[in-house]
């Protein structure tokens, strides 16, 4: 029994759609909201920790 190339393409499309939907459900899960909020604020953590950290770092490099 040979698998037709179109059947293989159809199965690949269905698999890709299922994987995409799984990632969407994972990303928008309410269980992950706190983790994603914390990750979104990571670039700003140094600024919140010490407001003069950027100025001190600039002086250190001069």
Image (cartoon, rainbow, N blue to C red):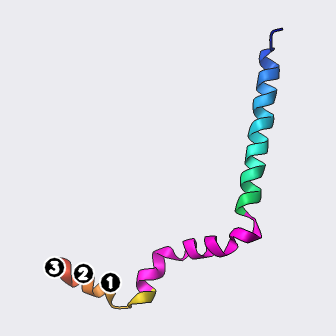
Query: What residue is shown with label 2?
Result: 58
* Residue depicted at 50% across the width and 75% down the height: 42
In three-dimensional space, the C-alpha distance between marks 1 and 2, rounded to whole angstroms, equals 6 Å
Marks 1 and 2 close (CB-CB < 8 Å): yes
Which of the labelled discs sits on residue 54, or is there none?
A: 1
In three-dimensional space, the C-alpha distance between marks 3 and 1, rounded to whole angstroms, equals 13 Å
The quadrant where residue 32 appears: bottom right
Q: Residue 21 location, x and y as percent?
A: 78, 50
On the rendered structure, is 54 left or right of 31?
left
Does the magenta-highlighted stretch encompass residue 5? no
The quadrant where residue 29 appears: bottom right
Asked which secondary structure carries label 2, the reply is helix
Q: How many marks?
A: 3
Q: Which residues are magenta?
A: 28-47
Q: Main secondary structure of the magenta part?
A: helix
Query: What residue is shown with label 3?
Result: 62
Q: Quadrant of the C terminus?
A: bottom left
Vertical arrangement, residue 6 with respect to residue 49, above or below: above
* Mark 2 crowdedness (10 Å alpha carbons): few <14, some 14-19, many ≥20: few
Which of the labelled discs sits on residue 14, or is there none?
A: none
* Mark 3 crowdedness (10 Å alpha carbons): few <14, some 14-19, many ≥20: few
* Mark 1 crowdedness (10 Å alpha carbons): few <14, some 14-19, many ≥20: few
């Amino acid at each position: 029994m040979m698998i037709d190339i179109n059947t293989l393409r159809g199965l690949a499309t269905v698999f890709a759609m299922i994987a995409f939907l799984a990632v969407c459900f994972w990303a928008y899960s309410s269980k992950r909201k706190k983790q994603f909020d914390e990750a979104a604020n990571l670039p700003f953590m140094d600024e919140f920790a010490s407001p003069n950290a950027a100025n001190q770092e600039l002086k250190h490099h001069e």
